[in-house]
């Protein structure tokens, strides 16, 4: 143990020296709270070794912060007492291309005795990844990140966005090349910054809503995928600032318009072989892959409280908007909540699934961990996928949806939180402390916006993510 600690100290010192030689003066250590906000402590580069050895102090109260920086409480967390230690993941230390003089690292949280903090979302994601590995499963995950870009206001921006006109720097049509031409320098710099930081971009393109774009990054192990999406968002934010622009990842930027999703893609492997390419199997899915996806599908009402954690999320989740608001799955069906993507027939690694409901207000570590937990429960309980659905469930009549067994997913955060509260598999996976903290934050968000109109909810949350 002492030898390993000495190796880590030496590694941290060498890393700190390299960062200083590259002109890095500060390192941002981030964690994501249960409201989906990336919080931060920073240390001078020369203090990175000390941070890696002893951690950086922070209060456990952040686990019950809401998106508007109010503080609620759970049975285990809340109030001014206690302390935790943030430990940077040295393997993920990244020099930030769009923030000269800065580097970034995601952090794990421990108590003062060196024990894992039971509400640490990143360690939850790691535990679920390890649980899958113990069952012989390797998961690869990746996110599609959508955002809306506007021109930054000339004066100080309104904190809530209320009564703030949005000035879009591009006016071209949805998915149109015009938008790429209008913002070609900006989009080039986003791609370049991500590449320099080691993030593999698969594609970047205009999306449907005004000023909206999407970037898709390569799949990775679940914890790295969650790290990547945090890095992607903050890189886009930094590049936007340098171009005099402002980026919003909020689920609903303008009420009534198509919102920002953050779709989660996943694929399963056993012994290096894709479970989405099983010869002669229905839909190409090996039995474990089918059961895993069946577990996710069955848990979606509760998973919405993880992946769609804000009242603003439910402004985005509207039928016939490709947001997946019905509890069904389909092969290449973009209106299904769970979409099976077959991939090219000659690609042995092709084929994966997409959870379409999630958005960027979600803590990505909670999202990947909860999805894995739901999938593993599907395998343990031998869950079977129902028949896939074709077409848009939103255009079907109530009786026809009932005949097909298609039900609407929760339409409010209250409904989703109620389902999470009753989910025994997710409670067991998350543990009492983390599960309780998530629910406390969800209930506080519900109460805060209980009397708010849609426009007010969108305005209040527009710049929080």
Image (cartoon, rainbow, N blue to C red):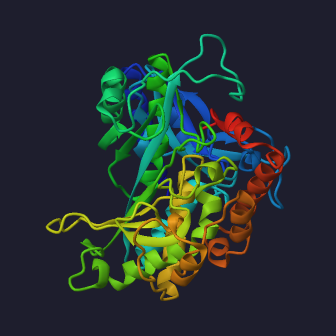
Decide if residue 409 is on the left or right side of residue 150.
Answer: right
Q: Residue at x 17, y 69 (%)?
A: 345
Q: Residue at 70% of width from left, 70% of height from top? A: 419
Identify which residue, 465 or 64, lies in the foreground. Answer: 465
Along the line of sight, which residue is nearer the eye, 225 or 149? 149
| Front in this rendered view, residue 132 or 151 | 151
Q: Residue furthest left?
A: 346
The answer to whether 215 appears left or right of 252 in the picture is left
Would residue 231 be seen by someone viewing this image from the given angle? no
The answer to which quarter of the image holds residue 170 is top left
In the depicted structure, whether residue 464 falls above or below residue 374: above
Residue 434 locus on image (x, y percent): 69, 61
Q: Residue at x 48, y 26 (%)?
A: 238
> Residue reaching furthest bottom?
382
> In the rendered view, would you say 119 is above or below 102?
below
Displayed quadrant of residue 387 = bottom left
Residue 79 screen position, x and y as percent:
85, 47
For residue 40, side relative to residue 351 (left or right): right
Farthest-out residue, top? 154
Residue 243 in view here: yes
Q: Residue at x 67, y 50 (%)?
A: 310
Left or right of 90? Residue 87 is right
Query: Residue 348's spot in the image, x, y percent?
Result: 19, 68
Q: How many marks?
A: 0
How far from the left and from the top, in percent, is residue 57? 68, 40
Q: Quadrant of residue 76?
A: bottom right
Give the quadrant of the C terminus: top right
For residue 250, above or below residue 463 = below
């Amino acid at each position: 143990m002492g030898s390993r600690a000495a190796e880590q100290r030496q590694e941290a010192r060498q890393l700190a020296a390299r960062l200083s030689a590259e002109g890095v003066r500060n390192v941002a250590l981030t964690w994501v709270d249960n409201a989906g906000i990336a919080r931060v402590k920073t240390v001078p580069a020369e203090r990175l070794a000390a941070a890696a050895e002893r951690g950086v102090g922070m209060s456990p109260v952040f686990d019950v912060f809401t998106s508007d920086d109010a503080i609620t409480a759970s049975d285990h967390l809340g109030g001014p007492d206690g302390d935790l230690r943030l430990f940077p993941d040295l393997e993920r230390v990244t020099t930030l291309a769009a923030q000269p003089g800065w580097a970034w690292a995601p952090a794990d949280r421990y108590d003062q005795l060196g024990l894992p903090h039971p509400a640490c979302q990143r360690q939850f994601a790691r535990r679920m990844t390890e649980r899958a590995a113990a069952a012989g499963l390797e998961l690869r995950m990746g996110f599609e990140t959508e955002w809306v870009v506007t021109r930054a206001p000339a004066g100080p921006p309104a904190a809530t966005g209320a009564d703030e006109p949005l000035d879009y720097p591009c006016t071209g049509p949805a998915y149109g090349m015009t938008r790429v031409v209008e913002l070609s320098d900006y989009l080039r710099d986003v791609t370049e910054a991500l590449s320099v930081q080691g993030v593999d971009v698969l594609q970047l393109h205009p999306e449907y809503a005004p000023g909206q774009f999407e970037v898709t990054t390569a799949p990775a192990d679940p914890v790295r995928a969650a790290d990547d999406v945090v890095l992607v968002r903050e890189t886009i934010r930094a590049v936007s600032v340098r171009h005099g622009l402002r980026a919003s990842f909020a689920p609903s930027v303008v009420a009534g318009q198509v919102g920002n999703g953050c779709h989660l893609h996943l694929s399963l492997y056993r012994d290096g072989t894709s479970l989405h390419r099983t010869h002669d199997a229905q839909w190409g899915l090996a039995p474990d892959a089918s059961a895993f996806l069946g577990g996710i599908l069955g848990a979606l009402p509760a998973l919405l409280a993880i992946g769609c954690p804000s009242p603003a999320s439910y402004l985005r989740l509207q039928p016939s908007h490709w947001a997946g608001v019905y509890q069904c799955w389909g092969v290449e069906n973009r209106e299904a909540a769970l979409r099976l993507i077959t991939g090219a027939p000659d690609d042995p690694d092709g084929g994966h699934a997409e959870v379409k409901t999630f958005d960027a207000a979600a803590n990505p570590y909670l999202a990947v961990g909860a999805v894995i937990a739901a999938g593993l429960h599907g395998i343990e309980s031998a869950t079977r996928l129902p028949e896939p659905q074709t077409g848009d469930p939103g255009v079907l009549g109530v009786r026809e949806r009932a005949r097909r067994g298609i039900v609407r997913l929760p339409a409010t955060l209250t409904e989703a939180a109620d389902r999470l509260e009753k989910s025994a598999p997710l409670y067991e996976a998350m543990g009492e402390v983390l599960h309780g903290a998530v629910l406390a934050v969800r209930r506080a968000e519900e109460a805060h916006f209980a009397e708010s109109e849609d426009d007010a909810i969108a305005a209040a949350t527009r710049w929080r993510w």
